[in-house]
Image (tube, rainbow, N blue to C red):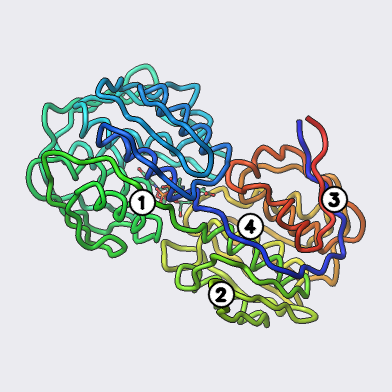
Amino acid sequence: MESITVRGNARLSGTVSVSGAKNASLPILAATLLASGTHRIGNVPDLRDVDTARRLLEKLGGRVRGHGVLDIETGKETTAEAPYDLVKTMRASILVLGPLLARVGRARVSLPGGCAIGERPVNLHLMAMERLGAEITLEHGYIEARAEKLRGALIPFEEPTVTGTANAMMAAVLAVGETTIENAACEPELVDLAGALATMGARIRGAGTKTVVIRGVKKLRPISYTVMPDRIEAGTLMTAAAMTRGDVLIEGAVPKHSASVMDKLREAGAVLEEEGSGLRVRGPGRLRSVDVKTGPYPAFPTDMQAQFMALLSVSRGLGVITETIFENRFMHAAELKRMGSDVVVEGNYAIVRGKKNLSGAEVMATDLRASASLVIAGLKAVGETIISRAYHLDRGYERLEEKLASLGARTSRVGA
Ligand code: EPZ
């Protein structure tokens, strides 16, 4: 199994580019099921999760060619089963539920099962499909969904759900009549999905706001579309630059997508300036501790929480992290403690007292963002850090260790 090694005391400098967004690519790839023909989707990152999405599309009767720019042929004959062996490796596979129901009137999708960061039920996805007229049963670990024809409806989410909103949008674009999603999630990735759907001929208003209105159409057409940059990868690189007294230009970063992260980095003492098609980040000698509270967009993203725990571990003072989205998203705390981090976890709070440096150690990645936090913590550790289970990192970062090495970090990948 592969590990990443990081030799500490790095000072990042130079220019790096952000890859395409994982959390926009996955729904947009699923959306290609809505229109038969050949779609060309560009700026798709080379990730394990994208590989899983490819295999899922092929399992459903499609053909996928290329890397970075994918040519996706969704056939006339689309099967409708998303099997457990794929769904268990990537919960986002649930994103085929809406498109399959809308396109072929049935779907058999494995329930995702457990997840390291929380229970993560899919009840809101099922509620949305039922509101649109689908009949849903749960049998033998599978969601069995059927609908002769979906009908527009009101879908009130009790709490904003990102992939739930995506599924509802993708189901509603081919439904008869109008659908209104209330308390929708507002993440930029949903605006990107709406952009792809509109390019297919869908009629959507209000994506990125709490109220999204979709007027169903009879047919959609295949598209060429370019996925947005990854704001979480951009945030991770910003944090690494800030905590290493770095001077880095992050090309492709979109400031408005990362406003809450940038505000916190500025509050901690980093300097962030728009420059050309990117963002320059300069880190001071030592950052000040700040408090962060995660929440649905535009609040501070839960997907940046772990990286900030690494940052607070080497900042001056005390910082409190409040995690409001997932009930078990502090697995990285125990691993950071192995590196000497002074962190105390109490329920959904983590209290971090900053130190000048961490010490290199052997640590284990437990989930995608936890692995990123260990890699950037290693940049500020004395000696070598070895992060095992690198496959977690590869789910959502396109060769992060190589990008950091291009900025002067001493990183490598070992084992096979
Ligand atoms: C998306 O997951 C992202 N994944 C996650 O990123 C991200 O952490 C999360 O949104 C929150 O921003 C993708 O886009 C593929 P939610 P999603 O539904 O859609 C509860 C990463 O690191 N809920 O918005 O699954 C849920 O338990 C990943 O890239 C229900 O109760 O998250 C959570 O507490 C990790 N019932 C809250 O809502 C439901 O049916 C928000 O979850 C659905 C969700």
Tag 3: amino acid:
Thr
- The label shown at residue 306 is 4
Tag 2: amino acid:
Met
Most distant residue in the top direction:
140
Q: Residues within 10 Å of mark 4 (few under 14, many from 20)?
A: many
- The label shown at residue 262 is 2
Mark-to-mark CA distance, 3 and 4 = 17 Å
Which residue occupies 61% across, 51% down? Answer: 369
Tag 4: amino acid:
Ala
Q: Which residue is mark 1?
A: 161
Question: Could you tell which of marks 1 and 4 lies nearer the N-terminus?
Answer: 1
Mark-to-mark CA distance, 2 and 3 = 27 Å
Which residue occupies 46% across, 67% down? Answer: 257
Tag 1: amino acid:
Thr
Question: Could you tell which of marks 3 and 4 lies nearer the N-terminus?
Answer: 4
Which residue occupies 71% across, 60% down? Answer: 344
